[in-house]
C-alpha cells in the first residue's frame, strides 16, 4: 500500500511517516522544504530503518507534481503541505491562499485524474473560530474564521466536501487538530520553528535552553480556572497514530468525514508551565502580559467521534508532551538543519 505524504518532512508529517512505516505502509514524501529539512529523511531512517522515497516538489507547480503521480501507483494521500503561521497569514494573505488553496486544488485534480480516491487532510480547530463553546463538536460545522490561515483551512474543507458530492466513491477524512506538541521519544524528530516561536510549548522550550529570557503569559484575566488561556494539547505521536487510523478508515469507507483530534482535556498556560518545570527539573521564568489579540479563553475538543469512528484515544499526557519536547530541544537546540 503506497501513501503519498505531502509536507512529509514537516513536524506532524514526519511523525506520521514513522507511524505509517511502523505499520508496514510504503510512504512517498513530497515537500518543497520551505519549512523543513531533507535531513529529516535520515532521522526517519534512524528510527525506522527505512528512508522513504522523496520528491522535492512544490504543490503549486502542477506539472512537476504530476510526475509524482505518473511515476508511482498511489493508493492514498495524506495532505500536510501548507503554510501555517496565523499572524503571517494576515500580512501575506495571497501567499497563504496560493499555497494552501491553489496548491491543494492542484493536488486534488491530480488525485482525481490518476484515480486516487482516498485522502486525509490536515484541518484545524481554528475553523470553529470563536463561534462555539467548548467542548467543540464536529456537528457545529465551521464558525467565523478570523485570519487567512483559518479561512484557507475552512475553504479546503468545503472543496473536499464538494469533491465528495461529485464523486461518490471518493473518501476523505478532515482531521481538525487541536494543539499538537511534543516530539518523538527518540528526540530525533520534533519541532523547532525558525526565529522566535509563536506557540506556547516551543517558546517555553527556547526559554528552558536559554535562548529566550522568559515566557510572556498572554493574560491572566480570562474566565478560566486560573485566569490563563485553556487549550487541548495533544502529543504529536498520538496525533500521528490518528492519521494511520484515519487512512485505514478512508481506505475501507466512502464519503467525507470531519473528525476532531484532541485529547478532550484543557490545560491552562500555568498548568503547562508546571508540567514543563517537572519535565526539565528547573523553574521557568515568566511574566504576565496583556492578552494576545485574537486569543480565546478556552478551546478543547469533544473526542467522541474520533473514538467511535476511528477507535482513536490519546495515550500520552501533558507530562509526556513536555518531557519529549524538552528531550528534542536539548538534542536539537537549533532544530534539524
Ligand atoms: P510544518 O510547517 O512543519 O509542515 C508543513 C510542511 O509543508 C513543511 O515541511 C513545508 O516545507 C511544506 N510545504 C509548505 N508549503 C508547501 C508547498 N507549497 N509545496 C510543498 N510543500 C510545502 O507544519 P506542521 O505543524 O507539520 O503542520 C502540518 C499541517 O497541519 C499544515 O497543513 C498545518 O496547517 C496543519 N495544522 C498544524 C497545526 C499545528 O499546530 N502544528 C494545527 C492545525 C493544523
Ligand atoms: N501563549 C502564551 N504565551 C506565548 C504563546 C502562547 O501565553 O508565548 C498562550 C496563548 O495565549 C494560548 C495558549 O498559550 O492561551 C496556546 O497558544 P498557542 O499559540 O500555542 O496556540 P493557539 O491555541 O493560539 O493556536 C493553535 C495553533 C494555530 C491554530 C489554533 C486553533 O497554533 O495554528 O491553535 O486551532 F489556528
Image (tube, rainbow, N blue to C red):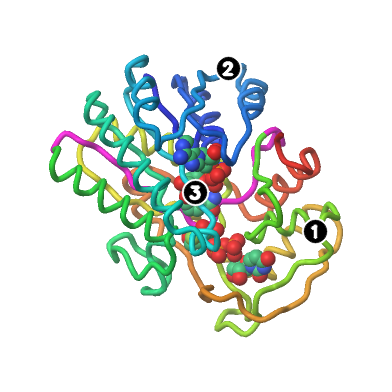
Q: Is residue 12 visible?
A: no
Of label 1 and label 3, which has the lower sequence position?
A: 3
Verify whether residue 172 appears in magenta. yes
Image position, residue 253 (x, y; %):
23, 35
Of label 2 and label 3, which has the lower sequence position?
A: 2
- The residue sitting at 80% across, 58% down in the picture is 207
Q: What segment is highlighted magenta in the picture?
A: 168-188
Occupied quadrant, residue 120: top left
Q: Which mark is residue 207?
A: 1
In this view, the residue farthest toward the top is 71
Circles 1 and 3 in contact, beta carbons < 8 Å: no
Of label 2 and label 1, which has the lower sequence position?
A: 2
State whether label 3 is within 8 Å of ligand 1: yes
Occupied quadrant, residue 111: top left
Q: Which mark is residue 83?
A: 3
Find numbered disc 3 in the image and state the secondary structure of the residue it sits on.
loop
Between the C-alphas of marks 2 and 3, the distance is: 27 Å
**Which residue in the structure is indicated by mark 2?**
50
At label 2, counting other C-alpha atoms closer than 10 Å, the crowd grade (few under 14, some 14-19, many 20 or more) is some
Q: Nearer the viewer, mark 2 or mark 1?
A: 1
Verify whether residue 175 appears in magenta. yes
Between the C-alphas of marks 2 and 1, the distance is: 34 Å
Between the C-alphas of marks 1 and 3, the distance is: 25 Å
Q: Foreground residue, 102 or 204?
A: 102
Image position, residue 130 (x, y; %):
41, 73
Amino acid at each position: 500500500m503506497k501513501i503519498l505524504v505531502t509536507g512529509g518532512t514537516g513536524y506532524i508529517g514526519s511523525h506520521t511517516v514513522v507511524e505509517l512505516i511502523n505499520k508496514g505502509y510504503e510512504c512517498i514524501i513530497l515537500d518543497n522544504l520551505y519549512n523543513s529539512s531533507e535531513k529529516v529523511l535520515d532521522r526517519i531512517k534512524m528510527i525506522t530503518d527505512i528512508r522513504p522515497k522523496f520528491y522535492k516538489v512544490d504543490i503549486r507547480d502542477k506539472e512537476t507534481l504530476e510526475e509524482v503521480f505518473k511515476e508511482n501507483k498511489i493508493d492514498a494521500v495524506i495532505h500536510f503541505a501548507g503554510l501555517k503561521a496565523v499572524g503571517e497569514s494576515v500580512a501575506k494573505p495571497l501567499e497563504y491562499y496560493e499555497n494552501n488553496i491553489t496548491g491543494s486544488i492542484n493536488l486534488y485534480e491530480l488525485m482525481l485524474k490518476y484515480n486516487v480516491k482516498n485522502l486525509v487532510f490536515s484541518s484545524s480547530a481554528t475553523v470553529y473560530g470563536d463561534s462555539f463553546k467548548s467542548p467543540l463538536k464536529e456537528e457545529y460545522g465551521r464558525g467565523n474564521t478570523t485570519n487567512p490561515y483559518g479561512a484557507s483551512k475552512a475553504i479546503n474543507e468545503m472543496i473536499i466536501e464538494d469533491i465528495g458530492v461529485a464523486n461518490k466513491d471518493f473518501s476523505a477524512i478532515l482531521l481538525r487538530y487541536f494543539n499538537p506538541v511534543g516530539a518523538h521519544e527518540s528526540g530525533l524528530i520534533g519541532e523547532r520553528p525558525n526565529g522566535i516561536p509563536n506557540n506556547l510549548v516551543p517558546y517555553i522550550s527556547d526559554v528552558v535552553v536559554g535562548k529566550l529570557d522568559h515566557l510572556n503569559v498572554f493574560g491572566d484575566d480570562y474566565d478560566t480556572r486560573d485566569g490563563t488561556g485553556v487549550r487541548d494539547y495533544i502529543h504529536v505521536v498520538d496525533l500521528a497514530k490518528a492519521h494511520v487510523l484515519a487512512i485505514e478508515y478512508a481506505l475501507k469507507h466512502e464519503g467525507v468525514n470531519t473528525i476532531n483530534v484532541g485529547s478532550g482535556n484543557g490545560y491552562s498556560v500555568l498548568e503547562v508551565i508546571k508540567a514543563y518545570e517537572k519535565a526539565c527539573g528547573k523553574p521557568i521564568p515568566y511574566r504576565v502580559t496583556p492578552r494576545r489579540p485574537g486569543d480565546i479563553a478556552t478551546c478543547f475538543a469533544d473526542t467522541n467521534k474520533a473514538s467511535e469512528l476511528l477507535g482513536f484515544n490519546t495515550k500520552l499526557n501533558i507530562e509526556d508532551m513536555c518531557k519529549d519536547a524538552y528531550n528534542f530541544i536539548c538534542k536539537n537546540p537549533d532544530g534539524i538543519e
